[in-house]
Image: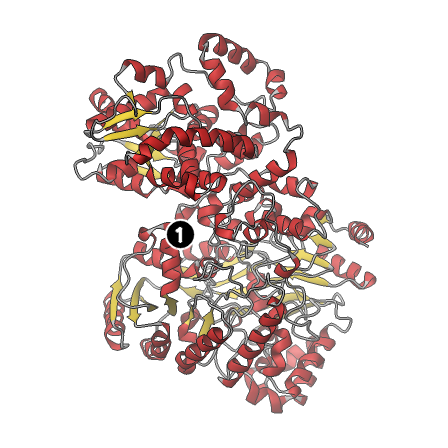
Amino acid sequence: MTTELTQALRRAGVGDVLSDGLSRAAYSSDASLYRLVPQVVVRPHERDEVLATLAVCRDAGVPLVARGGGTSIAGNSIGEGVVIDFSRYMNRVLEFDASAGAAVVQPGTVHATLQKQALAEGWRFGPDPSSHSRCTVGGMVGNNACGSRALGYGRTSDNVLALESVTAAGEVLRTRHGEDRADVVAASPVWAGLDAIAQRHLGVIRPEFARFGRQVSGYAAEHLLPENGFDVSRFLVGSEGTLTVLTEATMRLVREPSHRVLVVLGYADIYDAGDAAPSVLEFSPIAAEGLDKRIVDILTARRGPSAVPDLPRGEGWLFVEIAGDDRAEVIARAHRVADGCGALDSAVIEDLAVAATLWRVREDGAGLSSRSARDRPAHAGWEDAAVPPGRLGAYLREFDELMSAHDLTGLPYGHFGDGCLHIRIDFPLDRPDGMQGYSEFIDASADLVAKYEGSFSGEHGDGRARSGLLPKMYSPEVIALFGEVKRHFDPAGLLNPGVLVDPAAPTDYLRIPAAGRVSEPLALKYLHDGGDFAQAVHRCTGVGKCRADNSAAGGVMCPSYLATGEEKDSTRGRARVLQEMVNGSLVHGWSSPEVHDALDLCLSCKGCASDCPTGIDMASYKAEVLHQTYRHKPRPRSHYALGQLPRWVRLGGRMPKIANVMLGLGDRVGAFKRLAGVDPRRSLPELAPVTFRQWCSTHGVKTVEESDGQPDRVLLLTDTFTNHFSPEIGQAAVRVLRDAGLEPVITSRDGCCGLTWITTGQLDAARRILGKTLDDLEPAVRQGIPIVGLEPSCTAVYRSDALELLGEERAGGVARHTKTLAELLTGLDSWSPPDLSDERLTAQPHCHHHAVLGWSADAQLLKDAGADVTRLAGCCGLAGNFGVEEGHYDVSVKVAEHQLLPALRADPDATLLADGFSCRTQAEDLADRKGVHLAQILDPLHREVT
């Protein structure tokens, strides 16, 4: 059927049709618990292609689901027929009217794209979901999204001025907020019939709808009432693509206030914070968000204490934003909030940077809460219920009791000023009785929300998660009304079937129970996932942060997606393909083409390990896939040449002059590079005539054993890159350490972390190599000698990968003793940095430095030294062997063009600070700019020369 459907779509003039297994796997889920594999993915360029797709679906009887950013938490944007992805091409702001405060957008326009343009003109698009960096306006219209600032700016439905959408029958409907009812009814039989339905049901619409602001579940029938102007534009908002397919929207903008102040209120617990939320509303806040201590604890555990600024005393908090154009009035009102809402403690935060950091804690809540306090996977099955704000505290207490009764835990947060609770819960869906327990809990939860006269959905829509529960919230007459409306618009049931009307059970199509455990034999230990590869890849909840440009917050993830814009090249897309491999019904086995195609452009940068709120580590999964695929089998040429680079470098280091002649010849003859799997456009680095270890032997740097008994020793890791390519960096580090009153020492023999073997999936060899090096480092660990790494990627292996390869007992001591140079120096009470006020630096942190080690110590050191630093985010694009391999050059350059190359062009006189050998190589290869290491900047010899 897939082949015939694909051919029919192409004959109809639809240009971008994906029917391969990789694409179908990548689109098999969204940010929900659900999995439905589509037959075909269509990515339309214009409305005519949408109409053509609908015509083919009508003729074939194939259902269609509209999709934006794929961030739906309720399973609203997946289906078994055609998934139509608007985010690839129909993603533009078509018109922006700065005088009227309105914008016309296509459905695939990312919220952040519209917001950036609006803010530049002094406007703002009011609704701002936590997924604003990647969610689309079309998806927001589909779900009636709200976000943190709905208190001030309203829901999406409150901000819609006009819509253009098409019915399953192919009729183009154009509606405008505020149109006269008679004109609307006369415009189309669709509206006339809808008006007749509404008139027959006035008696149930009036009492059962619009009881409070976050009543999002079901169709928004209140907008059809005569007293509300029969507003069909706002009625369509929140219909989840079940009635029409949106092709264009005109959105209202609001003036951006001149001043914002964040007030943080601390309470004894989250329940007291819920009790206090209504009192905050008296001060007309823009936002009033609730946060629980458990989320803060997880964030600090994941990213360190500096990840969260100091919070007021308490274990539950309200984040209250006050805004306006009169600064004095805003600050005064903020202090009244701090004093007048019964908080144990409070803080008024005027510093916008600190406020932004706190808001990021809140925004990452959904992903951060994907692991429960018991370190079990937590899920979004009962995610955004809402109750009238005055009843929130009582509801929270009773809901927590319900979770305890079912032996479940979660991390609560939410829009407390609106009465909306977000929580992910550690349903044991991987257990045989998991689905039964899930069903019993959500049934009981629905009963509880109904008792409080709340809404099962407060902003994410009902989707597949809650549509089957609507009879618990609405009367039989309302359920019949929903069915009548659906059949009027879509009699054949083509548009998003199974959602809102005639729904599947909430336990149908669950993704995780379909996946079995994958634990033996694996090369990595998956210490945080119970040794289960399936659980590891199911860390991805689909929140889609990997589809956003995270560089503004210093992030790296996901460079390949930013380069290609393809779902398959996002961390989420790769995770979905691996999940399908684990499931085994669409993608079959480690060596399947779909798996390798999805992972081909993964740079192994580890950006997702720190930037993805779920902590997914695609670099490790890629290494495992390559290991399982090629173990005891022939490998790609680059695995031998680049994956075993340290071996060849050590051999060449015995005769560096001869080796450099051969490298120079290979550099000039592209065919030689291709034989090694190297792109011919890449240059080959020269070996140093004297290695770092050789230099140490003539400059008084002893081994650990030779220096036994000497005080203040520091073990310098002699990685391959420093030893053979950049010994001047090691030399500078020796001088810096001696200047700091420390005595650098080295191991008695050459060692290697096995990084290149790891990234190419040669994990058995990596384990052996790394094990020998750990043996050499063990004496330093026993004596409490700090271990300092100079090459970030190698240093990160000792802190992270070694644990996964060899376990805590074998590698834990080295991991705990290993530091970066900046971490060591900033931890010394007796050391202060030199004056670097004359240094202007463009800093490119290595991806592994950012993701595994953290660059905060480096940033603090440079700040204390007075250096003028422009820190770049994102990946340099070389990423070890990735950018050197044939087939990756163009993407490597495109990644470099995201941050690194523009920054170098913008400031040609700045010094490039790049600790990573890859980063320095990329800059020299593509921009003819040499980079320096932090050790060289701090080197006393360098300071004397300058």
Q: Is residue 62 left or right of residue 729?
A: right
Q: Residue at x 67, y 69 (%)?
A: 242
> Residue 22: x, y in percent?
68, 46
Any part of residue 362 in sight: yes
Mark 1, other Cα within 10 Å: few <14 / some 14–19 / many ≥20: some
Instruction: Please state which of residues 918 and 401 is positioned toward the viewer in this rendering.
Output: 401
Q: Is residue 645 left or right of residue 598?
A: left
Tell me the residue that label 1 is attached to: 302
Any part of residue 359 in sight: no
> Residue 544: x, y in percent?
53, 54
Q: Quadrant of residue 705?
A: top left
Instruction: Please state which of residues 107 and 860 is positioned toward the viewer in this rendering.
Output: 860
> Is 238 situated above or below 707?
below
> Is 97 situated above or below 720?
below
- Label 1: state its secondary structure: helix
Kindly give the residue lying farthest to the left in the view shown: 830
* Quadrant showing the C terminus: top left
Q: How many marks?
A: 1
Q: Quadrant of residue 505?
A: bottom right
* Protein image colouring: secondary structure
Q: Is residue 135 left or right of residue 22?
A: left
Q: Residue at x 44, y 36 (%)?
A: 797
Kindly give the residue lying farthest to the bottom in the view shown: 203
* Badge 1 amino acid: Arg
Instruction: Please state which of residues 279 and 177 is positioned toward the viewer in this rendering.
Output: 279
> Residue 583: x, y in percent?
67, 53
> Residue 385: x, y in percent?
51, 74
* Quadrant showing the N terminus: bottom right
